[in-house]
Image: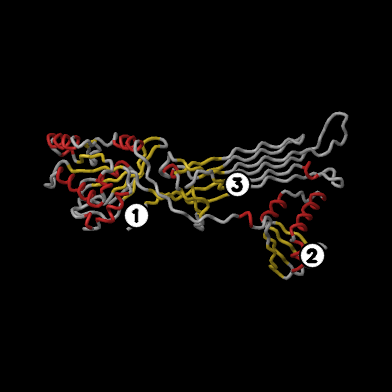
């Protein structure tokens, strides 16, 4: 039986695109041929994740799944650089692990305090002023902004439930958690316990929620391992606050006070520390109980210094005020959190900055796989000699031309780069 609850969410991230560089020429009265003055584009916004101790669940990511950082501003004339975009900051509970959805590789582990840049915004493009040289005095091309990184992430949070529902089987715990959360356990008039904990996230207000676990019903002798007692009690041990559900109606011939004492005896036998865990006692099925029974049990519980709340989960009586009562009580308790070390993706700075592969795909055909080169080609003005010359320089400096020669490229062979094709000319 698992002892970890996993809260998950799947989201898509789109970092901002860099602004395009401007193609502009200086114009001023009495100043002839002022020259190129196109400014650079601004940087696209990064997407940054920050651990927030005020959050405890990934509930909000079930309502919003796509996050887009702003794009950088395009460059302008007079060498005016476009404005850099603001970064998009996403807050998650401490301990959240970010993984690539398709591969499962860990992108980041938000257990620390430092912000983590998960998706980098695109670099701004160069304006045509950048391309001016003594031999290329009027460049009519600029560099487009680079797209930001796109990621499909799976968020995982190893949750230690804030609140645990305890009590004998068939006292209404499953019904209660189905009413206060989106959890949908199997509910029936069982006289035996279910075998797996049910986890529900209870929303109190905007950005206020807590995790509640329906712990399978304890039975007499659980502390000695009767049934699956040790496994169940380990789940209870991980909760900060216990909601002790008791059937005050006695509709099955049981004594509510004896049930209350028996459950606490099992907790104390398993762990003395567990016996001191804060409790709120819920008197369930009060709609079919005699009012005197409810009041007698209330006095019994309050004499022990515990909070008592009469409810009826089936009739939703006394349920509305329960989430706020529990949330406020949790704010008074110290957090109990455990995080496990995770594999962190290797640093990519050691990888080649301009990787490429050249493959012979036919008798007179070669295919170049280089995404960075496709972006340069997309910003090339094929009708401008100087722009094509710049592209040719990039081919030579990167080593692609040398690799083509090594593979015995011949004149007029077809070279494919992405969606583009051109003939090789010596």
**Which is in the foreground here, disc 2 or disc 1?**
1
In the image, 164: left or right of 56? left
Q: Residues within 10 Å of mark 3 (few under 14, many from 20)?
A: many
For mark 1, give the secondary structure: loop
> Is residue 305 placed above or below 372 in the rendered structure?
above
For mark 2, give the secondary structure: loop
Q: Which residue is mark 3?
A: 120
Quick check: can you spot residue 174?
no
Where in the figure is residue 332, as x and y percent of width and height? Answer: 34, 36
Q: Name, please, the residue furthest toward the front.
A: 272
Q: Residues within 10 Å of mark 1 (few under 14, many from 20)?
A: few
Mark 3 → mark 2, Cα distance in angstroms = 39 Å
In the image, 321: left or right of 44? left
**Which is in the foreground here, disc 3 or disc 1?**
1
Q: Quadrant of the N terminus?
A: bottom left
Sequence-first tag of 3 and 2: 3
x 76%, y 49%: residue? 381
x 41%, y 35%: residue? 206
For mark 3, give the secondary structure: loop
Mark 2 → mark 1, Cα distance in angstroms = 66 Å
Q: Which numbered marker is on residue 412?
A: 2
Q: Which residue is mark 1?
A: 3
Sequence-first tag of 2 and 1: 1
Dividing the picture into quadrants, the one containing residue 76 is: top right
């Amino acid at each position: 039986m698992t002892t970890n609850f996993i809260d998950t969410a799947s989201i898509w991230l789109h970092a901002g695109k860099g602004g395009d560089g401007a193609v502009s020429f200086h114009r001023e009265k009495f100043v002839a041929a002022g020259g190129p003055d196109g400014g650079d584009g601004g940087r696209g916004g990064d997407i940054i994740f920050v651990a927030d101790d005020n959050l405890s669940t990934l509930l909000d990511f079930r309502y919003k799944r796509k996050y887009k950082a702003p794009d950088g501003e395009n460059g302008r004339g007079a060498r005016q650089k476009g404005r850099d975009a603001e970064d998009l900051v996403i807050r998650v509970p401490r301990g959240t692990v970010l993984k690539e959805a398709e591969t499962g590789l860990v992108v980041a582990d938000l257990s620390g305090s430092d912000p983590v840049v998960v998706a980098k915004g695109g670099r701004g493009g160069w304006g045509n002023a950048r391309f001016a040289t003594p031999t290329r005095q009027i460049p009519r091309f600029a560099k487009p902004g680079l797209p930001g990184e796109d990621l499909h992430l799976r968020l995982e949070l190893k949750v230690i439930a804030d609140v645990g529902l305890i009590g004998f089987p068939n006292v209404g715990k499953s019904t209660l958690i189905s009413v206060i959360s989106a959890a949908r356990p199997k509910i029936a008039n069982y006289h035996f316990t279910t075998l797996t904990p049910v986890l529900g996230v209870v929303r109190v207000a905007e950005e206020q929620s807590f995790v509640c676990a329906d712990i399978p019903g304890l039975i007499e002798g659980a502390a000695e391992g009767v049934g699956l007692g040790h496994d169940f009690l380990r789940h209870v041990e991980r909760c900060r606050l216990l909601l002790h559900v008791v059937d005050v109606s006695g509709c099955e011939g049981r004594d509510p006070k004896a049930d209350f004492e028996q459950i606490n005896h099992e907790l104390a036998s398993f762990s003395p520390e567990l016996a001191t865990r804060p409790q709120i006692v819920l008197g369930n099925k009060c709609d079919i109980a005699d009012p005197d029974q409810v009041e007698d049990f209330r006095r019994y519980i309050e004499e022990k210094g515990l909070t008592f709340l009469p409810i009826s989960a089936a009739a939703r009586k006394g349920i509305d005020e329960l989430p706020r009562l529990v949330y406020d009580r949790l704010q008074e308790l110290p957090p109990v959190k455990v995080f496990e070390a995770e594999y962190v993706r290797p640093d990519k700075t050691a990888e080649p900055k301009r990787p490429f592969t050249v493959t012979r795909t036919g008798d007179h055909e070669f295919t170049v796989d280089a995404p960075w080169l496709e972006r340069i080609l997309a910003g090339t003005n094929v009708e401008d000699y100087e722009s094509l010359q710049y592209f040719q320089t990039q081919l030579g400096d990167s080593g692609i031309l040398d690799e083509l020669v090594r593979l015995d490229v011949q004149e007029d062979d077809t070279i494919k780069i992405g969606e583009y094709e051109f003939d090789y000319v010596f």
